[in-house]
Structure formats: C-alpha cells, structure tokens
Amino acid sequence: MRNKTGILIARRFLRAMTATVLAIIIAACTVSAKLTLHEIFTDNAVLQHGRPVIIWGNAEPSEQVTVKIAVKMVRINAGNDGRWRAVLPAMKAGGPFTLSVTNTAGDGAQILF
C-alpha cells in the first residue's frame, strides 16, 4: 500500500512540475512587440510633397507612439492588435528630413528622408 501511495505522490509531483516547466517555456517564448516601423520606411526614401504623410508600424497594444518629421508631430495610440498609423500634414518639397518615431519607454527609430 505504501508503494502505491508513493507512486501516486510521485506522479502528481511530476505532473505539477511538467505544468510549471511548460508555463515557464510559454512565458519565455512570448515575444514583446517592440516599436517598429514598416519595412518600407528606410533611409533616403522619398516622400510625396503636397500630400499628407502616412507612417505606420507596430508597437505594444494601446501603446502611445509619437511620430515627428521636421516640426510636424502627431501622437497616436496603437490598436489592440499593436498596429498603429499616423497621418502628418502635407509638407513642402525640401529636405533632408528626419523621421523620428518613439514610444513612452523611449524606444524608437530615426530615418533620414
């Protein structure tokens, strides 16, 4: 009888340990969505002058994102899916301009247009 009880306790312990290890692995594999710009935005890209400037990317869900080109700036919040889209007013021809995208944590990117 003792042997059966010991085996049952060992099985329960192994199940609990397996569940704990799986939970740790899943938590470690969960990737945080850092602030990113869409891959279309790269240094030396050309923006259409005289038209609104639309910039987009990904961030943490509901995270505030600040987008700035020259002296024009907008603040928007990422959606529940982490996607964000900012529309800046039309700009005159010129440049080079620096596109700066940041979040409240200070993560971000700068691109020269």
Image (tube, rainbow, N blue to C red):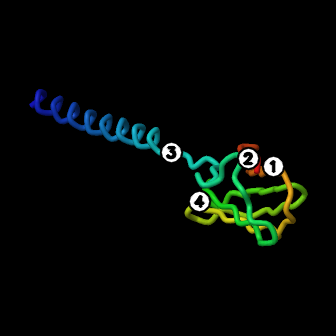
Chain-order first, disc 1 or disc 4:
4
**SS for callout 3:** loop
Q: Which amino acid does label 3 sit on?
A: Val
Identify which residue, 44 or 62, lies in the foreground. 44
Question: Relative to residue 67, is residue 51 depicted above or below?
Answer: below
> Label 2, label 4: how many angstroms apart (C-alpha)?
21 Å
Question: Which one is closest to the eye, mark 1 or mark 3?
Answer: 1
Instruction: Return the residue at label 1.
Output: 98
Q: Viewer-nearest of labels 2 and 4? A: 2
- What type is the residue that disc 1 sits on? Thr
Residue plotted at (84% across, 66% down): 91
User: Which callout, 1 or 4, points to the residue nearer the camera?
Assistant: 1
Q: Residue under circle 3?
A: 31
The amino acid pointed to by label 4 is: Gly
Circle 2/circle 3 CB separation < 8 Å: no
The secondary structure type at the circle numbered 1 is strand
Residue 111's disc is 2
Question: Sequence order check: which comes first, mark 2 or mark 4?
Answer: 4
The x, y position of residue 1, in whole percent, is 9, 31
Q: What residue type is labelled 2?
A: Ile
Query: From this viewpoint, is residue 105 visible?
Result: no
Earlier in the chain: of badge 3 and badge 4, it is 3
Residue ID for mark 4:
82
Between marks 1 and 4, how big is the CA–CA gap?
24 Å
Residue 81: assigned label: none
Q: What element carries label 4?
A: loop
Residue 65, x across and y down, in percent: 73, 57
Residue at image location 57% in from the left, 49% down from the top: 33
